[in-house]
Amino acid sequence: MTDRPGRSGPQSPTSNSQQQGSNMKTLVIGAGNMGSAFVKQLHAAGHQVSVVAADPAKAEALAAQHSGVRAVAAAGAARDQDVIVLATPYGEAVNALRSLGDVAGKVVIDITNPLTPDYMGLTIGHDTSAAEEIARAVPEAVIVKAFNTVFAQVLAAGADFGNGQTVSVFVASDSEPAKESVKALVRSLGFALVDAGGLKNARYLEPLGGLNIYLGYGAGQGTGIAPAWIHKA
């Protein structure tokens, strides 16, 4: 999801740390509300976290809040990372990802929604999605759609809503190894996992993210909400 409110490239092998979902090397692109929430939760879950931002001072300030988190320069930052979190607005996503340099085979979580300026609509949809467009623009990366239906406030506070309610994260990708890596990361953060199939299903997930934003802001329900997928016992 934003701060307010295809095809995949080469598949990278899944390492032991990715399979276990712990101690993964993670890079967060962005130091806004979503980027800050990711850094907080990834650090708390025991992952190795680096952060990069268009404004290096913001990355430095965010890193300083968490012992062991590093602020790094964009160029070459993807090297040795298990998972990259693209925590930018959709309009900035491609350039932000390209700024890293070589991202061949890297697992990239796209959290974006292609929102109109008033946040109440989507700029693309039906026959494509933000995730698919990013995948087309940066085909060497392996794009995984996830977390676009989760408000920054929810991510920062954690997945437990109380009374047995756990926030769902929907994960879609054309790469099964990449999807498994992201599933492991989702579970390590305590969220309920919903496998949403191939990357083209981001065409459904992004409108769901848009609906969540409408309900939170347009309908006045606030940011303590999230869509969930439930199963009959």
Image (tube, grey):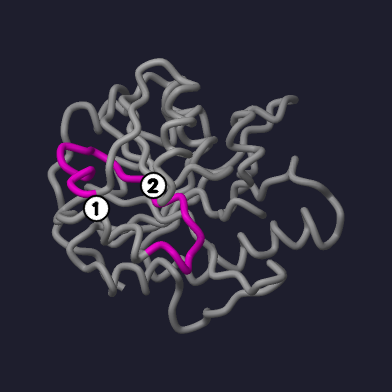
Q: Give the range drawn in magenta.
A: 75-93
Q: Residue furthest right?
A: 220
Q: Residue furthest front?
A: 57
Compared to residue 71, the image places residue 87 above or below, namely: below
**Residue type at tag 2:** Ile
Q: Where is residue 213 in the image (x, y as percent from the top left)?
A: 70, 58
Q: What element carries label 1?
A: loop
Q: Which residue lies furthest to the top in this view?
A: 67
Q: What element carries label 2?
A: strand
Q: Which mark is residue 100?
A: 1
Compared to residue 195, the image places residue 113 above or below, namely: below
Compared to residue 195, the image places residue 25 above or below, namely: above
Q: In which quarter of the image is residue 219?
A: bottom right
In-image side of 159 versus 87 (left or right):
right
Q: Which mark is residue 177?
A: none
In-image side of 162 versus 77 (left or right):
right
Q: Residue sitting at 47 percent across and 55 percent down?
A: 88
Query: Do the residues bearing badges 2 and 1 touch, measured as CB atoms within 8 Å?
Result: yes
Q: Where is residue 132 in the image (x, y as percent from the top left)?
A: 36, 71
Q: Residue sitting at 69 percent across and 57 percent down?
A: 212
- Viewer-side residue, 172 vs 83: 83
Label located before the other in sequence (2 or 1): 2
Q: Position of residue 56 (x, y in %)?
A: 39, 42
The residue singled out by tag 2 in the image is 29
> Is 82 within the magenta?
yes
